[in-house]
Amino acid sequence: MLNYFLIGFSVLALVTIIFEDITKINKAKTTLFLGCFSWVCLYVGAGSATHQQIITKDLNENLLEIATLWLFLMSTMTFVAYLNAKGMIQLIVQKIFPSQISVRLLMIQVSLFALVLSTFCDNVTATLVTLGLLSTFDLSSEVKLKMAVLVVFAVNSGGVALITGDVTTLMIFLSGHVKMSELVTLIIPSAISVILLSSMFSYNLKGTVSTTKVEKNYNGIDVAITILFFSTIVLTMVLNILFAIPPVLTFLTGLSIMFLVGSLSRSNREEVKILEYIRQVEFDTLLFFLGILLLVGMLKEIGVLDTLAHVYSQHSASVSNYIAGTFSALLDNVPLTAALLKADPNLTTPEWLGLTYGVGVGGSLLIIGSAAGVIAMSKVKELTFGSYLKFFPALLICYSLGYGLTLIVGRYFFG
């Protein structure tokens, strides 16, 4: 009975997110409350001291995962807040893009930029940088909304092709089921599906847009911090591959160097200003993540994910992988992937690639299905659960195409 009650909490959390525009209650507050209260209910219903100790152990693991994500997000957001305030991202955009560009071409270029960037760095960083890029263009609300949805899909699509782009890709790689050379082939279906989505979104759009001209008010320190940011992204990938150093540690180190550069090169008042960029971080986003991950951790605790893994193993792998991807739009793909790996299904290489693509890209179907979506929702005011849901048919078509192409490519090269 308690399990059904807790599952109801998860459904209620989803409902409060969907109807946030009607209730006017911030989704971060409702998910945080329901996430915390669900764990309180677990303790109350434990029944024995031994069971309570098990719950405490699992809660600590869940909180460790959340804390790692929090610190990583805080580090990345602080960097991006500084670079945006100094106009450095806008300056980079002006170097890459022409001052005037058609809306249709911009959509394709931005989607490919997000796709490539997310293969080399994490989805959160890729989303923040790409959305910062978009802010330099004078876009209408309709175009900005489509662009944001496109960025979410492109970032998640690019992340599956390398172990540096998505945690689930890394998990499947470390389990020994796929090789690096096999994963790289996923860039083909990912790129085709992203180009299709950008073409669908830009079909009826006309006209051109121009970048916002940025005055050169930066100095040598701002350039140094920009270089530090992109160096941190590269080092995050390199150090993780060579020495298994967690990305959060590398980014926190980069952030600490940023503060040191500020303290060594500026007066006390200017140094305080650099530290204050932490205040520009969207803490609503962090609280929303906290609530969502607590709820997912609770579902894992009561065995919902294990049940899904059992159901998964009872059906055709090609179908199950596709459906697992759609489930990742509702459940965090990391514990979902962990549960599927624990089930140890007997899959061929094309089927493992299908699973990698499914759990990595399927989260794009709903705005709450991926870190990229949640970040985008906090940064683009036009983007809500409801406004994103309008694009579900187009996203499902492109996800389905990408998944089908993944199986075809996998069988062609490794079948």
Image (cartoon, rainbow, N blue to C red):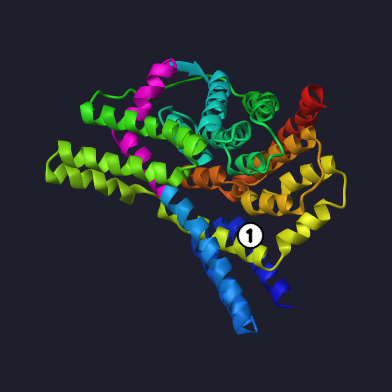
- Identify the residue at image location x=32%, y=51%: 279
Q: Which residue extends farthest right?
A: 315
Magenta highlight on residue 254? no
- Magenta span covers which residues? 73-99
Give the position of the N terminus as an image quadrant.
bottom right
Question: Magenta segment, principal secondary structure?
Answer: helix
Name the residue carrying label 1: 14
Residue 209 is situated, as x and y percent measured from the top left of the image, at 47, 21
- Identify the residue at image location x=37%, y=45%: 252
Give the position of the C terminus as an image quadrant.
top right
Please name whichever residue, 344 or 193, is drawn nearer the observer in this view of the structure.
344
Relative to 218, 315 lies left or right: right
Please name whichever residue, 291 or 248, is drawn nearer the observer in this view of the structure.
248
Asked if one can make out residue 159 in the rendered structure from this viewpoint, the answer is yes
Q: Secondary structure at mark 1?
A: helix
Residue 208 is situated, as x and y percent measured from the top left of the image, at 50, 19
Residue 287 is situated, as x and y percent measured from the top left of the image, at 47, 59
Please name whichever residue, 12 or 158, is drawn nearer the observer in this view of the structure.
158
- Identify the residue at image location x=71%, y=49%: 341
Q: Which residue extends farthest front?
A: 243
Which amino acid, by three-letter code, is at mark 1?
A: Leu
Magenta highlight on residue 89? yes
Q: Tell me where residue 59 sits by quadrant.
A: bottom right
Relative to 348, 17 lies left or right: left
Q: Residues within 10 Å of mark 1 (few under 14, many from 20)?
A: some
Q: Is residue 291 above or below residue 317?
A: below
Q: Is residue 185 above or below residue 265?
A: above
